[in-house]
Image: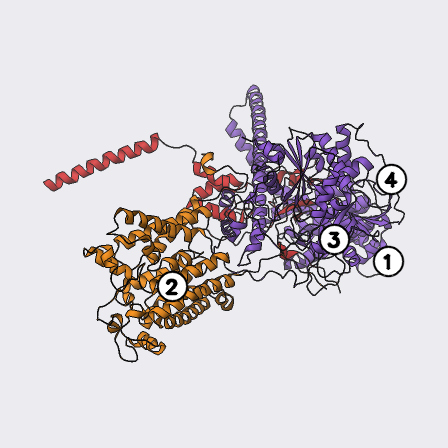
């Protein structure tokens, strides 16, 4: 009989990294399903491609780095990155977009910085920015939501569209992007901005068929689904409430203020909360523990910063949505935020009083 | 507006940051009475069981001791004695595996009980008549040191240095599994309250707060009943949360105050004692029952009867476990202390000491071993759990980088090593272990820095001294020179330079014939000594044959010596052997000499050990000196060392003093010869 | 002509500034190089001389003068790292000729000591006590483990013993704990 030497504590909470990551991925499922229903099955194809690429590239880099592969693949962090990127890009973007993006996220943004836990930027968002900047056409090929779609798309159509640029029945991407009456569609956020700059009032713009009475058709439901998934994560204590609340709160307040001051030139607060990637970004992307702030106070500041950036870019910028830029810019400030929001340790007087 | 004191008095509770809720698993033992164990076959009583230094030993091997008799003295303030837990014989005082995470051996007294359990005379004190000083002395002499786990000598804590406002009795016992304090309160509440009375007499606090977690209804009721006559004693039930039993955390919970970093609780007028310590104080003062036993929770799923046991200090863990029906698994973990802060034992001979509150022998299913450590995902679950509001993740980073300055900036030393961070870590990083290593490294660096400072001072002082001596010598020489010159001038010498030149020339002429002469002289001497050596060698072989039949010189010496000299002889022989070995490894030119030298050394040892150990040692040393020199003078040929060797042989049998002189002479000659040969 | 003017003007200016610089160098000269003090601060002050210099300060001066920073075995990697930071050079591994630092102190086998005082004279920090013809002993708390007393001993009765680990100096190396295997 021999005895085992171990360091205390000998007791462990059995919630592991891989379980946490799996939960995050699982919490995306409602959002993904709604997305698939409203915007076609392309998202599922993208998802499969992204996951395969992520696993493959992660394993490849781990081999090159001479690390053990299986424990790190099992931590599911590559899976989460793949899922987040897959749901962010247009569902019918060509296959090489997602493959390139995922490979970039895993290889350049994550592994080259030292792997899980060491990357300063959110891999999915950094990859999204890379794609958006490099391939603006493909990255803005959003289809109208279901009721406005020109043609009914089956899963096989989705696969054909992703791999060939044409659906199985031969529609081109441009055709698919159009509504039945032949108008090429942009996303609700884009539409509103273009309309506003074209001199229409917000309420006039919102009369367009792409909008329902709150935000875009489909987009509203997608956001709602991600909100549901986010609340699940909160309930499971996978994420902290601070970042999502700070983001949505800031966004709400900013949009409310400008909407009240000039309802004709601004989207309503509800429009902002339920358009674009708001809920996905607030609950799933900004809360990525690796690249977010780690202190309680810091998380609030981080969330507020993202909220401000999102609103500013949506209002003044030229991109379809602002979350990727906001998150990556906020990532850059994290070390600074963390440094200046160190909590007061037990038995110490606060920093301010010391000075 | 209520003052803080009024708030505390009215039962307000505060909260501390973080904390965790691991499964408590206390019900296995909290319902059963404290079992009294039979006296074990052996007691291993470590000399030091508290924070501080061990006292002077008062007993010898073979001595009979009585129950409660002090085995070490309480000779200074940082010392508390240890006592015999039962009557019996001290069979050994030796190193024994310590009840410390390192399991390094430390001195312990091994006591064989005689089964009589005979007490030493006891002098119970009366609280009404005894004065505070006598009580404090009794507490120290009874060996009482914090039973909660820190082992800090209690008399130092309660020797009144400043105004004490709050006396807090810590019965929170937040670690999972452990119910020792719970049971003590259930069974001994009245004695505990008497202990608090004693403390009140010593400290005169404004209020007494007894903090326990609200999962101990029976103990709470017992304590409330026992305190019913005391207006000033308040039972405070705090919510179950680990680590609410930590000193700093309980102070925050009960008073809302924080102990400033790096200070003691007495600095803010708070004294906190563990409930077990209070019980021990009551026993010591009122019954003159020193700290020789304590309640230990023996638990875990590998035991058929997990329960609390009143164990004698020094009882081996193996005895305790087998008493409770231990059925070990493969790669069993046996933990001393609780699952959060306890340490694993490498073997079961480790004794129960004053700070041992739990022995935990869990199954693998019950407490699975930690999985492989994976990358930190910066989730900050650790920071959320940290009861000291530190940032464990940053600390981990800087611990790995060994960045001492940053570690201090992030308050590493405020970490209480409670293990909450490692408990919640999804990547199973053994954070506490990293911090402990980092702390130990920093402490070592601090010790080294201090030592370097002292060393530098000593070095400088020495240099200064040497410089001073040099100056003095120089001055003396100058004075002498001046005096000489004066004398010379008086005799009227005309030209000093010419004089000096003449002197040098004269000396040159002298040295050459002198050198030849010297050499001849040495050769003659050597011849003589060789003869002597031969004679001696013969004599020696005769002696050798007389004393032992064995062939090798080494065994000769071992067998030949009388009992009382055995050790010295053995050492001498061993050294001689070592020399021989060294000599063999030497290069070819010196081989002959070397071969001869150890032989001589050995014979010296043989010869003299029968005589006088001190002489033998000296002779051996001299022989060694010769050997060393012989090896060093590689230029020199066979003759001179051989000569010295024979001299040694000759002299050693005679008189060590003479031998030394002879040796010195021979050495001088040898060196001269070497010099002249090489020049 | 204009070329000449320009050249001479530049030349005069150069001489002028050179003169000012030269004057400043003399006028504002810092007597004791504070760098030496800083280096000396970092060195472990064992005064062992294993670097080839008689004590830590001389080695500090040598480093300031451009000597290698990796000649200090008692300081080990930590000292080299600090020196590298201070001097702005690459940290090198400890000189191969030097032995790595395991903490040792000298121990005199007192039965064998002949009282020659040679080790006392060799000790740079006065950590050996004793008198002529009387045995000597090492004050192990003061000993820096510099080795300097071992060589002078004529009877080889000094050895360097590793400092034993105690529960106070133990550094939580769980892997070194000997697990006793019972049958």
Q: Is residue A210 visible?
A: yes
Discs 4/1, front: 4
Discs 2/3, front: 3
Which of the pair A270/A12 is nearer the observer? Answer: A270
Query: Are callouts 3 and 4 both on one chain?
Result: yes
Which of the pair A136/B604 is nearer the observer? Answer: A136
Q: Which residue is mark 2?
A: A105
Categorize mark 3 by other alpha carbons within 10 Å: few (<14), some (14-19), many (20+): some
- Chain coloured orange: which letter? A
Categorize mark 4 by other alpha carbons within 10 Å: few (<14), some (14-19), many (20+): some
Query: Are callouts 4 and 1 both on one chain?
Result: yes
List x then y, in percent, for residue C79.
Answer: 51, 46
Categorize mark 1 by other alpha carbons within 10 Å: few (<14), some (14-19), many (20+): some
Q: Which residue is mark 4?
A: B120
Query: Are callouts 2 and 3 both on one chain?
Result: no
Categorize mark 2 by other alpha carbons within 10 Å: few (<14), some (14-19), many (20+): many
List x then y, in percent, for residue B205.
Answer: 67, 31
Numbered mark located on residue B31 in the image: 3
Q: Is residue B568 visible?
A: no
Chain C takes which shade in the image?
red
Q: Give the SS element for disc 2.
A: helix
Which of the pair C49/A276 is nearer the observer? Answer: A276
């Amino acid at each position: 009989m021999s005895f085992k030497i171990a360091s205390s504590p000998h007791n462990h909470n059995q919630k592991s990294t891989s379980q946490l990551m799996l939960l995050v991925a699982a919490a995306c499922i409602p959002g993904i399903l709604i997305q698939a229903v409203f915007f076609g099955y392309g998202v599922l194809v993208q998802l499969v491609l992204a996951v395969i690429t992520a696993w493959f590239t992660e394993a490849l880099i781990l081999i090159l780095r001479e690390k053990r592969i299986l424990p790190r693949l099992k931590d599911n962090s590559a899976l989460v990155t793949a899922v987040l990127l897959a749901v962010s890009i247009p569902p019918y973007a060509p296959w090489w977009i997602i493959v390139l993006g995922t490979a970039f996220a895993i290889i350049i943004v994550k592994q080259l910085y030292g792997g899980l836990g060491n990357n300063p930027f959110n891999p999915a968002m950094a990859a999204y920015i890379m794609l958006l900047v490099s391939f603006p056409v493909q990255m803005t090929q959003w289809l109208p939501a279901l009721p406005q779609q020109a043609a009914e798309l089956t899963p096989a159509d989705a696969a054909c569209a992703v791999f060939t640029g044409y659906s199985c029945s031969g529609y081109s991407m441009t055709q698919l992007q159009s509504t039945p009456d032949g108008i090429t569609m942009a996303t609700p956020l884009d539409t509103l901005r273009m309309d506003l700059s074209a001199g229409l009032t917000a309420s006039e713009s919102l009369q367009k068929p792409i909008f329902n009475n709150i935000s875009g058709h489909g987009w509203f439901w997608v956001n709602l689904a991600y909100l549901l998934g986010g609340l699940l994560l909160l309930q499971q204590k996978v994420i902290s409430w601070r970042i999502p609340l700070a983001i949505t709160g800031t966004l709400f307040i900013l949009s409310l203020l400008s909407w009240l001051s000039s309802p004709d030139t601004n989207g309503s607060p509800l429009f902002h909360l339920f358009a674009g990637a708001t809920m996905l970004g607030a609950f799933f992307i900004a809360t990525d523990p690796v690249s977010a702030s780690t202190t309680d106070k810091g998380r609030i500041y981080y969330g507020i910063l993202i909220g401000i950036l999102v609103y500013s870019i949506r209002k003044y910028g030229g991109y379809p949505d602002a979350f990727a830029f906001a998150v990556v810019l906020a990532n850059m400030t994290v070390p600074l935020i963390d440094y200046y929001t160190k909590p007061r340790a037990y038995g110490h007087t606060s920093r301010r009083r010391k000075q | 507006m209520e003052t803080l004191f009024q708030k505390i008095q009215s039962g307000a509770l505060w909260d501390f940051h973080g904390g965790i809720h691991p499964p408590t698993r206390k019900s296995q033992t909290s319902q059963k009475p404290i079992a009294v164990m039979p006296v074990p076959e052996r007691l291993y009583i470590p000399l030091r069981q508290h924070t501080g230094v061990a006292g002077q030993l008062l007993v010898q091997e073979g001595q009979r001791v009585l129950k409660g008799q002090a085995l070490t003295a309480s000779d200074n303030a940082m010392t508390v004695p240890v006592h015999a837990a039962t009557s019996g014989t001290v069979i050994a005082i030796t190193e024994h595996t310590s009840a410390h995470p390192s399991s390094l051996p430390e001195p312990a007294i091994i006591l064989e009980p005689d089964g009589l359990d005979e007490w030493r005379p006891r002098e119970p004190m009366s609280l009404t008549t005894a004065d505070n000083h006598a009580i404090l002395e009794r507490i120290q002499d009874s060996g009482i040191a914090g039973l909660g786990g820190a082992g800090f000598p209690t008399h130092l804590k309660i020797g009144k240095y400043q105004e004490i406002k709050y006396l807090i009795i810590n019965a929170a016992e937040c670690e999972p599994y452990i119910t020792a304090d719970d049971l003590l309160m259930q069974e001994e509440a009245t004695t505990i309250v008497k202990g608090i009375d004693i403390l009140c007499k010593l400290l005169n606090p404004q209020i007494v707060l007894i903090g326990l977690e609200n999962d101990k209804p029976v103990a709470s009721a017992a304590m409330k009943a026992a305190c019913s006559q005391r207006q000033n004693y308040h039972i405070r039930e705090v919510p179950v949360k680990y680590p609410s039993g930590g000193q700093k955390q309980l102070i925050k919970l009960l008073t809302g105050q924080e102990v400033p970093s790096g200070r003691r609780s007495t600095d803010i007028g708070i004294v906190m004692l563990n409930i077990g310590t209070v019980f021990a104080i009551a026993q010591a003062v009122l019954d003159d029952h020193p700290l020789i036993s304590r309640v230990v929770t023996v638990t875990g799923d590998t035991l058929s009867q997990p329960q609390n046991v009143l164990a004698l200090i020094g009882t081996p863990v193996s005895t305790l476990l087998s008493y409770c029906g231990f059925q070990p698994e493969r790669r069993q973990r046996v933990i001393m202390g609780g699952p959060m802060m306890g340490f694993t034992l490498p073997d079961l001979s480790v004794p129960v000491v004053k700070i041992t509150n739990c022995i935990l022998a869990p199954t693998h299913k019950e407490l699975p071993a930690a999985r492989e450590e994976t990358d930190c995902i910066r989730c900050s679950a650790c920071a959320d759990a940290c009861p000291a509001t530190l940032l464990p993740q940053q600390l981990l980073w800087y611990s790995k980088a060994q960045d001492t300055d940053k570690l201090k900036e992030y308050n590493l030393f405020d970490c209480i090593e409670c293990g909450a961070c490692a408990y919640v870590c999804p990547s199973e990083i053994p954070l506490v272990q990293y911090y402990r290593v980092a702390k130990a490294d920093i402490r070592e660096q601090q010790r080294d820095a201090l030592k370097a400072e002292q060393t530098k001072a000593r070095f400088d002082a020495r240099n200064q001294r040497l410089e001073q001596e040099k100056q003095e010598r120089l001055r003396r020489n100058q004075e002498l020179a001046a005096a000489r010159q004066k004398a010379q001038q008086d005799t009227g010498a005309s030209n000093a330079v010419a004089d000096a030149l003449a002197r040098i020339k004269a000396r040159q002429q002298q040295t050459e014939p002198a050198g030849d002469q010297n050499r001849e002289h040495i050769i003659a001497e050597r011849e003589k000594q060789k003869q002597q050596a031969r004679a001696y060698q013969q004599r020696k072989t005769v002696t050798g044959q007389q004393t032992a039949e064995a062939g090798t010189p080494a065994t000769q010496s071992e067998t030949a010596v009388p009992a009382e000299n055995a050790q010295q002889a053995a050492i001498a022989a061993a050294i001689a052997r070592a020399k021989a070995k060294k000599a063999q490894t030497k290069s070819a030119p010196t081989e002959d000499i070397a071969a001869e030298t150890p032989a001589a050394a050995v014979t010296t040892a043989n010869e003299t050990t029968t005589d006088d150990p001190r002489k033998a040692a000296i002779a051996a040393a001299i022989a060694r000196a010769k050997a060393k020199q012989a090896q060093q003078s590689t230029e020199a040929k066979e003759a001179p060392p051989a000569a010295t060797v024979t001299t040694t042989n000759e002299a050693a049998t005679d008189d060590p003093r003479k031998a030394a002189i002879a040796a010195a002479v021979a050495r001088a000659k040898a060196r001269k010869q070497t010099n002249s040969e090489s020049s | 002509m204009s070329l000449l003017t320009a050249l001479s003007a530049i030349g005069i200016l150069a001489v002028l500034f050179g003169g000012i610089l030269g004057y400043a160098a003399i006028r504002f000269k810092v007597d004791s190089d504070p760098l030496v003090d800083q280096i000396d601060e970092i060195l472990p002050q064992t005064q062992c001389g294993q670097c080839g210099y008689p004590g830590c300060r001389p080695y500090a001066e040598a480093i300031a003068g451009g000597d290698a920073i990796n000649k200090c075995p008692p300081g080990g990697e930590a000292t080299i790292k600090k020196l590298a930071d201070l001097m702005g050079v690459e940290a090198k591994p400890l000189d191969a000729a030097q032995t790595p630092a395991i903490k040792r102190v000298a121990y005199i086998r007192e039965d064998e000591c002949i009282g020659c005082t040679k080790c006392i004279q060799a000790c740079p920090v006065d950590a050996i006590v004793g008198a002529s013809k009387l045995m000597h002993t090492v004050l192990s708390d003061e000993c820096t483990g510099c080795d300097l007393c071992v060589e002078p001993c004529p009877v080889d009765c000094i050895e360097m013993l590793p400092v034993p680990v105690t529960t106070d100096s133990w550094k939580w190396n769980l892997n070194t704990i000997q697990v006793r295997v019972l049958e």
